[in-house]
Image (cartoon, rainbow, N blue to C red):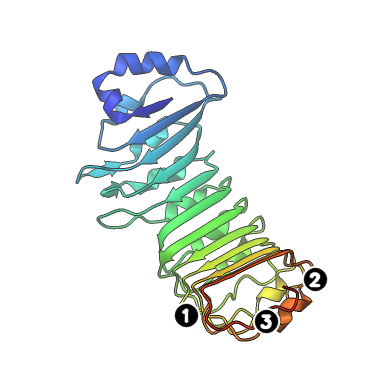
Amino acid sequence: MILTNTLLRDDRDNVLERVSKIERGGQLQLLVQEPIATDLYRFPIDKSIRVYVKIQGTTEEKLSLEFLKEFSNIVLFEIQHAWAIADAEFISTLAHAKKILFGSVLKGSISIAPLAALNHLEELEILLTPKDIAVLQSLKSLQTLILNRGKVESLEVIQSLPALTALDLFSLKIESLRGLENSKIKFLNLQKLPKLNDVSQLPSLSQLTNLTFNNCTLRKLPKLPHLKELGLRDVKDFEDASELNNSLQLARIFVSGKKSFIPWRAL
């Protein structure tokens, strides 16, 4: 069932009746597009019902997140293109959240500090990543992390994320992969990283099986014997493919957008 705050406001009795009919273990999708009184969200809902919340503001007003405290079983939470967010600290009440998309706001910004309390979080995507992401070190259950655009320059926090197996870095200012050493990352996607010039940390990722460079500068790729799939898309200045022959488990390789590329002998 998809529930909008407009429906709650205009036809509350009918909405409550429909909510009461959701079967145990079912889903309730809540789409919040405009400010609305918190008490309108107070209605009985079985704790076995999974709640998905999406914030997508369409008015030039601040959206309050206070209503989040009315739900104890939100498993997915998204903020996408809201005008502005008030009282973001209520995000820390999402004790059972498994996936969060920390999207952009059109006016101001959102602090990621409330994420520190979400130790059951498994998947996180941050748009407009701030320079300091040390707060993420408490997310010991995090398996997938997507850092999408922003000012972050250091990846040292990765050392504090023991469950992390998938990392996507997009349009950041990082110059090296320092911080990824000896992590359990299996899937690594690197996109639009114009300052990246040091990937010497890659061989220490003994569980890395899937690696993609997209719109990056890369002269040489180190020996990666455990790699199974490699993507090189619009990679600039790539000159030395000799170590690809030492990637004994490499089953698939994708290469595109290159004017000068030394062919891999196994192709």
Figure quadrant of the C terminus: bottom right
Q: Which residue is mark 2?
A: 248
- Secondary structure found at label 1: loop
Q: In this orientation, does residue 208 appear?
A: no
| Rendered residue at 61%/78% (across/down) | 199
Q: Are marks 1 and 3 in contact (CB under 8 Å)?
A: no
Q: Quadrant of residue 187?
A: bottom right
Q: Residues within 10 Å of mark 1 (few under 14, many from 20)?
A: some
Give the image location of residue 201, x and y in percent: 65, 77
**How far apart in space, not on screen, are marks 1 and 3 (Cα)?**
21 Å
Question: Of marks 2 and 3, which one's residue comes earlier in the chain?
Answer: 3
Q: Which residue is mark 3?
A: 241
Q: Quadrant of residue 220?
A: bottom right
The amino acid beneath tag 3 is: Ala
**How far apart in space, not on screen, are marks 2 and 3 (Cα)?**
14 Å
The amino acid beneath tag 1 is: Lys
| Rendered residue at 53%/18% (across/down) | 23
The amino acid beneath tag 2 is: Leu
Nearer to us: label 1 or label 3: 3
- Secondary structure found at label 2: loop
**How far apart in space, not on screen, are marks 2 and 1 (Cα)?**
30 Å
Q: In this orientation, does residue 102 appear?
A: yes
Disc sitting over residue 195 in the figure: 1
Q: Is residue 221 above or below residue 134?
A: below
Q: Is residue 225 above or below residue 71?
A: below
